[in-house]
Image: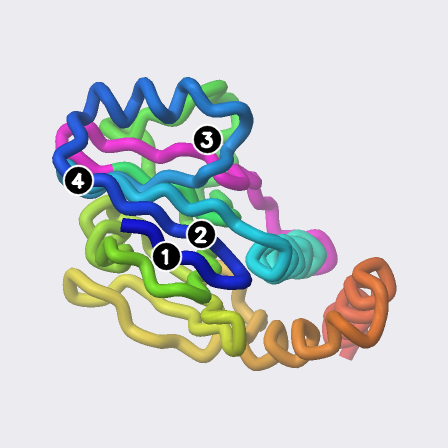
Amino acid sequence: MSLVASAETRTLLENIRWETFLEMADARSGSVPRMTYDQGVLELMTPRRQHEQIGRLIGRMVEAFSEVRGIEILSCASTTFKRWDLDRAFEGDESYYIAHADEIRPRDEVDLLVDPPPDLVIEVEITKSAIAKLKLFAAMGVPEVWRHDGTQLTMLAKSDGGYAPIGSSSGLPGLSAARIDAFLARRFDQGETALIREFRAVVAAECIE
């Protein structure tokens, strides 16, 4: 089954063995299509410009915010995070270690059987995924997930086996969904460099107050 929209293309494959998923992931050039694997179901997502622009701008704001506030982070971009014991794997649009950044920094590879999952996963999902991503993230222990539907950002924190909406980030205190949305809304009016420079200045001014 294939769903095509302006922002992304999704293809769903069923009855895929774990070993086949690993072979397909390794055979790619780069991280496209992005893969989500959930107990035999494999979704291939090829992002287009709108999807990539939103995800990268959110990522740049995370990086600018953490730099100004002096919060150490470790960017993992679209790294493939795998749990063979759960028969699940995912690749976010952006992902970060925050609380566990110092712990993960020396590792060339992350093994989720012994290492923690990323502290923050950012997902742009303009067309609906056929996989229940939040259930998958919860099973893999991701503490915080941000989801953007092309219009609005929703921040979610792990709670009682699922996720509950939060207005501001738990891992990056002081960074709210409303602020990110306000800057994203202006992405067609000015260049990315100017937008991120202004975002950084706003965050820096708050540190002085």
Which range is magenta? 67-88
Is residue 122 placed above or below 188 in the rendered structure? Answer: above
Q: CA distance from mark 3 to mark 2?
A: 32 Å
Image point (42%, 46%), residue name: 45
**Which labelled disc corresponds to residue 3?**
1
**Which labelled disc corresponds to residue 19?**
none
User: Amino acid under label 2?
Assistant: Thr
Q: CA distance from mark 2 to mark 1?
A: 6 Å
**Which labelled disc corresponds to residue 14?**
4
Q: CA distance from mark 4 to mark 1?
A: 15 Å
Q: Earlier in the sequence, mark 3 or mark 1?
A: 1
SS of the residue at dot 3? helix
SS of the residue at dot 2? strand
Residue 81 among magenta residues: yes
Q: Is residue 48 visible?
A: yes
Q: To which residue does mark 2 refer?
A: 9
- The reply to whether the C-beta atoms of the residues labelled 2 and 1 are less than 8 Å apart is yes
User: Amino acid under label 1?
Assistant: Leu
Q: CA distance from mark 3 to mark 1?
A: 36 Å
Question: Which label sits in the foreground, 3 or 1?
Answer: 1
SS of the residue at dot 1? strand
User: Amino acid under label 4?
Assistant: Glu
Q: To which residue does mark 3 refer?
A: 104
Question: Which label sits in the foreground, 3 or 2?
Answer: 2
Q: Earlier in the sequence, mark 4 or mark 1?
A: 1
Q: Is residue 62 visible?
A: no
Q: CA distance from mark 4 to mark 2?
A: 17 Å
